[in-house]
Amino acid sequence: MNQGKKQQNLKQDQSQEINIINNETIPYTEAEESDQADGGFPQVQDGGCAVKELSELGWNDAWSDTWTQWLDGLNEAVTRRFAGELVPARVSLAHKHLYRVISADGEWLAELSGQARAGMLTLSDWPCVGDWVAIAPRQAEGRATIAGVLPRRSLFARKVAGNRRDAQVVAANADVALLVTAMTSDFEPRRLERYAALAWDSGAMPAVVLTKADAAEDPAAFAAEAMRTVPGADVFAVSAHTGAGLDRLQALLAPGTTVVLVGSSGVGKSTLANALADEEHMATQTVRESDGKGRHTTTHRELLPLSGGAWLIDTPGMREVGMIAVDGGSGLAHTFEDIEALASDCRFSNCSHRHEPGCAVQQAIALGELEAERLKGYHKLQREIAYMRRSEEAQLKRQQANSVKKLTKTFNTSSKRR
Ligand SMILES: Nc1nc2c(ncn2[C@@H]2O[C@H](COP(=O)(O)OP(=O)(O)OP(=O)(O)O)[C@@H](O)[C@H]2O)c(=O)[nH]1
Ligand SMILES: [Zn+2]
């Protein structure tokens, strides 16, 4: 799919306030205009982002099975309402309650059916970029109705610790999470551990990308350290500037694979994305020249095609994902498999691996089998998770207290009126 050029042109056409969907020109509707008033309408992603086959978007036998099961589970009213009209589509852009979705027939502007809306009980139920949804196209209008969201394979959320259901999902169904870190003084094994834990928790497969190979004296040493830090993950040393190592990385990103980039600011995520996309897809902060206002373009929430046929989810929320702590469940255990394995030999089952007698972890450190720094990283992440849990609980309590207060006030006011 080589539509990058077209996409660029479309982006520059924004000031004309048109959307091109399914090759038709459709003026903004009221809903879009009001969205635009508070923050700008999402950029037109790609006029004819038509895929020849759904598999290009990552659809496969497993998704087909999920689809069948999902349809079977629909209640009678929904089945009757959409009688045979539902087709799968993938969300390429989420903007408040308006979505862009790509189906085998092309790209649609879509909104949730009232019934689907009513079923959105928590923030995480709402569709987000990467989601597979069931749509009923409304051919005449060139719009579509979203009847529901298929169960997700993986998800990245803004707030993962504690109550996952209340997290805002910022990327769904990523297959691969590229943990991006530069081979400079920025390189921080402890941070990499945190990203790895986050990725394992998300359900996506982590792989490490070490950037700025051209500026590193000994890329192999960084790679070795990364392999020790994230056991079991593929490690790629690349330079977006010279192109070194990109081929090997491209091979991981098979057609239909969905990938996200996780990493701190300045490590080269945008540059890498550009190199993989072969186009300047990521010009998120270009100034709008066309209307002379010099206003920044809206930030994206997008599913971007990469040159090898894979897709990159780049949402503003993804940038925050790396900042937060993780669930503290399987992700932590997975990342620190070595420590967890040693821990099973500790004398006490609740050993904290600090001062307890018979601690197998401390013993391994004494024998030089485990780096003390790694245990420090483990403890630090544990502490952060505990801290997040506590602050979330406190926040929840405050919210509850506030709503009780509000209710009481409403009650008092209305009883005074009576
Ligand atoms: N030498 C070298 N510099 C690079 C490479 N890739 C990126 N950089 C530089 O690193 C700086 C940061 O790159 P970005 O791609 O903006 O980093 P980012 O991770 O997207 O940063 P945020 O947008 O803040 O999250 C820029 O000055 C790039 O030119 C590389 O392969 N080699
Ligand atoms: Zn121990």
Image (tube, helix red, strand yellow):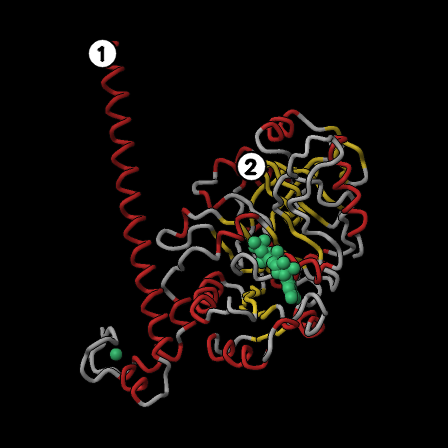
Q: Check mark 2 vs ligand 1: CB closer than 8 Å? yes or no.
A: no
Give the amino acid at mark 2. Lys
Q: Is residue 99 above or below residue 260?
A: above
Reading the image, the residue beneath label 1 is 416
Reading the image, the residue beneath label 2 is 96
Q: Residues within 10 Å of mark 2 (few under 14, many from 20)?
A: few
Left or right for 344, reference 305: left
Quadrant of the snapshot with the C terminus: top left
Can residue 63 be seen from the camera position used here? no
Q: Secondary structure at mark 2?
A: loop
Residue at the far left in the pictured view: 357
Q: Quadrant of residue 146?
A: top right
Residue at the far top in the pictured view: 418
Where residue 35 appears, as percent x and y from the top left, is 60, 30
Left or right for 215, reference 391: right
Where residue 147 appears, as percent x and y from the top left, is 59, 41
Q: Please tell me which residue lies in front, 98 or 337.
A: 337
In terms of sequence position, does the residue under pointer 2 or pointer 1 come before the other?
2
Numbered marks: total: 2
Give the amino acid at mark 1. Lys
Where residue 236 appears, as percent x and y from the top left, is 61, 74
Ligand 2, image quadrant it occupies: bottom left
Tell me which residue sits at (54%, 66%) in the image: 181
Q: Which mark is residue 16?
A: none
Tell me which residue sits at (35%, 78%) in the image: 339
Q: Quadrant of residue 274?
A: bottom right
Q: Check mark 1 vs ligand 1: CB closer than 8 Å? yes or no.
A: no
Q: Is residue 4 above or below residue 202?
A: above
Q: Please tell me which residue lies in front, 343 or 189.
A: 189
Q: CA distance from mark 2 to mark 1?
A: 39 Å
Mark 2 or 1: the one toward you: 2
Q: Please tell me which residue lies in front, 134 or 368.
A: 368
